[in-house]
Amino acid sequence: MPTAIVTGQPVPGSPLESDLRSLGFEVRMAASTAEAETLLAAAPAGDRVALVDARFVGHLHALRLGLTDPRFPLAAVPGAVTAQPAARQALTRAVARDTSSGGGTAVAVDSIADRVVAELDADGSEVHRPELGSLVAVVPTDPQARNEARQSVAAVDDEAVRLKSAVKSRDGFFTTHFISPYSRYIARWCARRGLTPNQVTTASLLTALIAAGCAATGTRGGFIAAGVLLIASFVLDCTDGQLARYALKYSTLGAWLDATFDRAKEYAYYAGLALGAARGGDDVWALALGAMVLQTCRHVVDFSFNEANHDATANTSPTAALSDKLDSVGWTVWVRRMIVLPIGERWAMIAVLTAATTPRITFYVLLVGCAFAAAYTTAGRVLRSLTRRARRTDRAALALADLADSGPLAEAVGHVVRGGLPGLAVPAVALLGGAAVAACAAFSGFGSALPVIGALVYVLTSALAVARPLKGALDWLVPPFFRAAEYGTVLALAAKAGVNGALPAAFGLVAAVAYHHYDTVYRIRGNAGAPPAWLVRSIGGHDGRTLLVAVLAAVLTGAQFKVALTVLAVVVALVVLLESIRFWVSAGAPAVHDEGEPA
């Protein structure tokens, strides 16, 4: 049980002790820094501990934000500071220094908690300070100031602020105006009944899978039910994040579930639509796989660009300035958010089209919309990259190398070739190599050796593209080019096989590999590093898998190729899923969730 050490003389009528207990703290009183140091040493080493000034006046939610957020080892608001077990030693040192200095000789601050925070800052410890906005958190020094602080607390509705803060400040038009106005209340309902974000996330997944099952029936009633359930799944998808922010129930496992289940839900729904269309005599598996390939490549563009530039120095450009200027005009913000088809707009479009039209029309519209969105966002990012004078860091280059997912073949060729390509030649070679293998697969007959030759060229160009650190202006395009080449080749070869079941098998293989790539992204986002090298080597890397599929298509019959794709999909899925589950359940990676807007 976490311990809160309240320092100083208790203030009559103060709700501080009851507020702390309502937040789950065991309250201990300390009249001085020395006594606080003794109580700190006696507190259980594996629990959170907090120092709070007895004169603290503020909202309960201000204390909650400052003292209970699990994402930060050290956190503070005026008059209160907390440490999780990982930062306990830093807090102990700060308290000891304050005690030895006589309680305020080094820093002219009357509050013990605030002096300890100053000591932590001086020690170089990173102390998180949540944005409180309209919330109050102060340590008044006289009765008049205390009375004014209490009036300020009474003037602001703590619960209204908490509900508002549960909603992300930046979201799509559909989510902001059609989901969040009521999903926040669902989140509060869940919190009051002890439900966790992970439970809501799982409910969202199950709802989406039921929606996919309804779509797979191929009946008009099934399609209508599928559309309704897909929207319901999205409402729950919004609710889990809002519940995490409302209750501050963040977790490493929850961050992973929230991220990966979104992709699983959408791609499972594509499969359900394809199955439903097949029941009506229409084969749209190629469209379903194409939609998954396009959507995954869009995401890789987002991830690669952000990783390449999030800590770049001199990170400015005229294009970015124009974008910021457009965002200052209200209506353009919403238009720009809608045309990139974020998840809310995309799922709403899919749901309506499923209920009102056919799977083929749904996929056609989805492909056109996603292609336009991809062209718009990628063109803007290319312009930004070419017009900014930014220096990429070693961390960014390492992240791009991890996202590239190069296997042992590319590594071996890279050791032989050595050196690297200059400037814009890196993404150009990656693009040409990927286009070569995909074109060979698409424009040759099944069983031809041409795709194998294209795959060998692809292995060579892939090795050349990653032979040096990816720090060039457009090097962030290399991972999405690799994704498009691998997935596109699998799609083309399966379509050329000409046997029932080849495209569904290819869908399964691409889904398994895409899961591995998404898993890599979220490990990097959590500062946990890329998947282990043995995993990448065991599943071949993008280059090895592409060559293997090309060879299988050249030496096997269509029926045998279908079986081979199925076996490969199962093997890849088992290997990456088992390692991913092992890592996220046991790893100490930090919880990562999108923030709500400041209170």
Image (cartoon, rainbow, N blue to C red):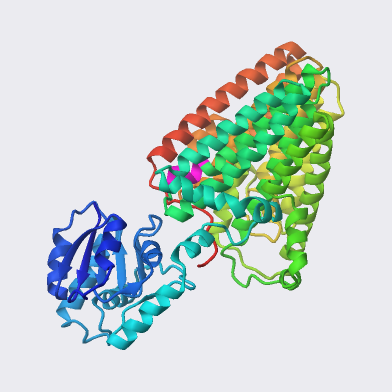
Q: Does 413 appear above or below 388?
A: above
Q: Quadrant of residue 7?
A: bottom left
Q: Does 456 appear above or below 255?
A: above
Q: Nearer the viewer, residue 274 or 177?
A: 177
Q: Nearer the viewer, residue 328 or 182?
A: 182
Residue 312: give x, y in percent of width and height. Answer: 59, 66
Residue 73: give x, y in percent of width and height. Answer: 35, 60
Q: Which residue is depicted at the point 70% across and 20% down?
A: 552
Residue 238: give x, y in percent of width and height. Answer: 58, 48
Q: Which residue is depicted at the point 81% across and 18% down?
A: 280
The answer to whether one can see residue 466 in this image is: yes
Q: Which residue is depicted at the point 61% across and 29% down?
A: 209
Q: Quadrant of residue 422?
A: bottom right
The answer to whether one can see residue 531 in this image is: no
Say whether residue 523 is left or right of residue 416. left
Magenta span contains residue 572: no
Which region shows up in magenta? Answer: 251-257
Residue 497: give x, y in percent of width and height. Answer: 79, 18
Q: Nearer the viewer, residue 246 or 445?
A: 246
Dominant secondary structure, magenta = helix
Looking at the rendered structure, the number of numbered marks drawn on it comes to 0
Q: Nearer the viewer, residue 13 or 500?
A: 13
Magenta span contains residue 252: yes
